[in-house]
């Protein structure tokens, strides 16, 4: 299933995250795709706010993984950008799809570690602040989530 969401800025991107958050279940994996500066980390910030993360969410580009255990459920934020062409056997598989929500930026660089069922969000820059965010589901579970979000936005 595919649904396109149009964002006119940070607040709209946060709104999408806020709509998505209550529909997610422990073990869910979100794949964030798009160019640098397209809004992937902004989306994760919105998701973190929805889950009650107290501190600032920053891209874990240099850390690769940041864990937010104070959120409900725990939020695991992976940025695989620096893993292009590298050995990916660094223990990330111990966090993906486990006891929290896993959000992965640049998932193509760790593809062998990804579960079969995921929800992809593809970010396209339309202007300085405007973004097209396409939600792509690949299972009945994620199809239902996309349908709910689509219904709420179109209501």
Image (cartoon, rainbow, N blue to C red):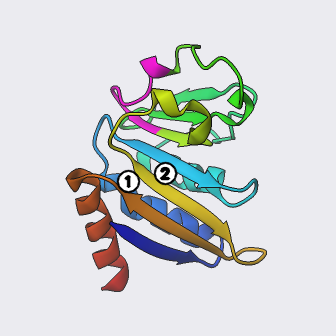
Q: Quadrant of the C terminus?
A: bottom left
Q: Quadrant of residue 63?
A: top right
Residue placed most toward the observer, 115 or 14: 115
- Residue 101 is covered by the magenta coloring: yes
Q: Quadrant of the N terminus?
A: bottom left
User: Residue tagged by mark 2?
Assistant: 47
* Image height of 74 relative to 134, above or below: above
- Identify which residue is drawn at 66% across, 73% down: 9
57 relative position to 2: left or right = right
The magenta stretch is: 93-102
- Identify which residue is drawn at 55% across, 60% down: 122
Residue placed most toward the observer, 41 or 94: 94
45 relative position to 81: left or right = left
At numbered mark 2, what does the secondary structure look like: helix, strand or loop? helix
* Image height of 136 relative to 100, above or below: below
Percent position of residue 133, x then y: 54, 68
Percent position of residue 126, x then y: 70, 77
How busy is the neighbourhood of tag 2: few (under 14 within 10 Å), some, or many (20 plus)? many
- Identify which residue is drawn at 31% across, 49% down: 24
User: Residue tagged by mark 1?
Assistant: 21
- Residue 47 is covered by the magenta coloring: no
Residue placed most toward the observer, 104 or 44: 104
Q: Are marks 1 and 2 in contact (CB under 8 Å)?
A: yes
């Amino acid at each position: 299933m595919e649904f396109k969401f149009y964002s006119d800025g940070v607040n709209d991107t946060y709104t999408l995250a806020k709509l998505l958050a209550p529909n997610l279940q422990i073990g869910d994996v979100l794949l964030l795709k798009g160019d640098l500066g397209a809004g992937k980390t902004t989306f994760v910030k919105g998701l973190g706010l929805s889950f009650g993360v107290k501190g600032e969410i920053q891209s874990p580009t240099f850390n690769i993984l940041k864990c937010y255990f104070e959120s409900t459920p725990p939020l695991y934020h992976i940025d695989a950008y620096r893993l292009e062409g590298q050995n990916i056997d660094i223990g990330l598989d111990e966090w993906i799809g486990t006891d929290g929500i896993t959000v992965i930026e640049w998932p193509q660089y760790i593809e062998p570690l990804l579960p079969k069922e995921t929800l992809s969000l593809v970010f396209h820059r339309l202007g300085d602040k405007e973004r097209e965010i396409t939600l792509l589901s690949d299972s009945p579970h994620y199809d239902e989530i996309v349908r709910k979000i689509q219904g709420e936005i179109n209501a």
